[in-house]
Amino acid sequence: MSDQKQSYPTRDESWELLCEYTKSDSLRRHALAVEHIMRRLAEKYGEEPDLWGITGLLHDFDYEKYPTAEDHPYQGNKILEEKGYPEEIRKAIMGHADYTGVPRDTLMAKALYSCDELAGFIFAVTYVRPSKSIHEVKVKSVTKKLKQKSFAASVNREEVEAGIQELGVERSEHIQFIIDALKEKAEILGLGGI
């Protein structure tokens, strides 16, 4: 963990910023999911949970307003810079989109990339379960669905695999880690079942 404490806007200020730009409940739930996973990953690696959590919370905050590859996450990066977010957060967010060409050269950037697409995919796997409960989702079912290209077709499987490789974790363990993190916030995320 870095000894250097960097000042940046609070989690509450970050939530307000997200809500200002993101009106969709599903995109807000995705942001909350990635925030929580990032907090758990920070704890796992002995890093700063608030820093990592805010990075996860804001990684797509500009997407609803600026959904094109020409604008996202570039517009968000400008807004975050104006609001005083440190380069470490902004660079990790820029790096979560392959097309920016921004290298993921920090553990935080690799962690964000490793959980973003996969979190969305696990939401999709949860929603097709009869119970619609994350508590019934198993690694085996996620792995099986990843092989079905027609299932949640918008999820980039190459990015899911690259994220796991870059973070240097075992695939099944990483999937289980994310499932477990999502279980902790199941009700808030709409994954508690029917």
Image: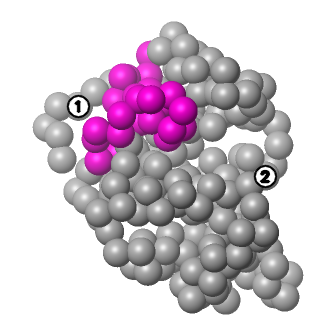
- Which is closer to the viewer, label 2 or label 1? 2
Question: What is the secondary structure assignment of the residue under circle 1?
Answer: loop
Residue on which the image places disc 1: 5
In the image, what residue type sits under mark 2? Ser
Residue on which the image places disc 2: 26
Mark 2 surroundings within 10 Å by alpha-carbon count, few (fewer than 14), some (14 through 19), many (20 or more): few
Q: For the C terminus, which image quadrant?
A: bottom right
In this rendering, the answer to whether 189 lies above or below 4 is: below
Q: Residue 122 appears at what percent x and percent y? A: 64, 70
In the image, what residue type sits under mark 1? Lys
In this rendering, the answer to whether 136 lies above or below 153 is: below
Tell me, yes or no, if residue 6 can be seen here.
yes
Question: What is the secondary structure assignment of the residue under circle 2?
Answer: helix
Of 34 and 145, nearer the camera is 145
Give the distance between the C-alpha atoms of the residues marked 2 and 1, in whole angstroms: 33 Å
Furthest toward the top, the residue is: 82
**138 falls in the magenta region:** no
Q: Residue at x 66, y 65 (%)?
A: 121
Circle 2/circle 1 CB separation < 8 Å: no
Q: Residue at x 51, y 28 (%)?
A: 100
Q: Residue 132 appears at what percent x and percent y? A: 79, 80
Q: Residue at x 74, y 55 (%)?
A: 154
Q: Residue at x 53, y 21 (%)?
A: 77
Of 27 and 9, nearer the camera is 27
- Within the image, what quadrant is residue 124 found in? bottom right
Q: Residue 18 bears which disc, if any?
A: none
Mark 1 surroundings within 10 Å by alpha-carbon count, few (fewer than 14), some (14 through 19), many (20 or more): few
What is the number of callouts on the image?
2
In this rendering, the answer to whether 83 lies above or below 102 is: above
Find the magenta span and give its range: 83-108
